[in-house]
Amino acid sequence: DLEAVPIFNINVECSNCGWQSDSVHLDATSEVDSGRGKHQCNLRLKCKSCGRSIVLDYVPRSTGKMANKGEKQPVVSIEARGGSVCGWTLTHCIVHVESGMDMDVELEDGEWYDFDDEAGVPLEMTGVECTVE
């Protein structure tokens, strides 16, 4: 099982003028003022081109079992107002492995290798590609 990633590196596009941000960090545990009354959000940006406010919220979801090798695996939902997520990179996650342990995964160049001592099997994540749908 692939569980919630606490910090996402994302690129955002303004829905008003099309400006695209450099990579920004969306921390699923942080709460900031959204600029709309008492509503809190995980990240609030100001478009550097038109000044419009872009508000982003991580939406918790269960992803279930890992997809088979070569299949796409949904891992996150992000609600955006005033803009949209146009790209992202996975660098950290937690994987629930065969022996029942949770393993902390730090991806380097889209790859991770380890060994599940309890189950006696090698573990790997390779060819990780992040898309927005």
Image: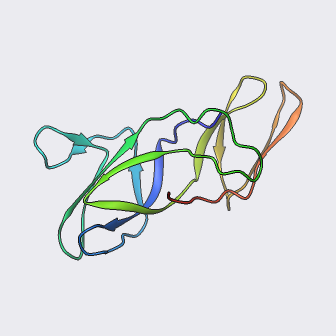
User: Dividing the image into 4 quarters, which one contains the N terminus?
Assistant: top right
The quadrant in which residue 75 appears is: top right
Q: How is the image coloured?
A: rainbow
For the residue pair 3 and 27, the one nearer the viewer reads as 3
Q: Residue at x 47, y 57 (%)?
A: 9
- Return the residue found at the far left: 37
For the residue pair 94 and 66, the one nearer the viewer reads as 66
Residue 51 % position (x, y): 17, 70
Residue 95 % position (x, y): 66, 36
For the residue pair 65 and 51, the one nearer the viewer reads as 65
> How many marks on residues?
0
Above or below for 60 versus 9: above
Above or below for 81 versus 96: below
Above or below for 83 versus 49: above
Q: Residue at x 72, y 22 (%)?
A: 100
Residue 76 % position (x, y): 49, 45
- Say left or right for 40 vs 3: left
Residue 5 % position (x, y): 52, 42
- Say left or right for 86 vs 40: right
The quadrant in which residue 123 appears is: top right
For the residue pair 65 and 104, the one nearer the viewer reads as 65
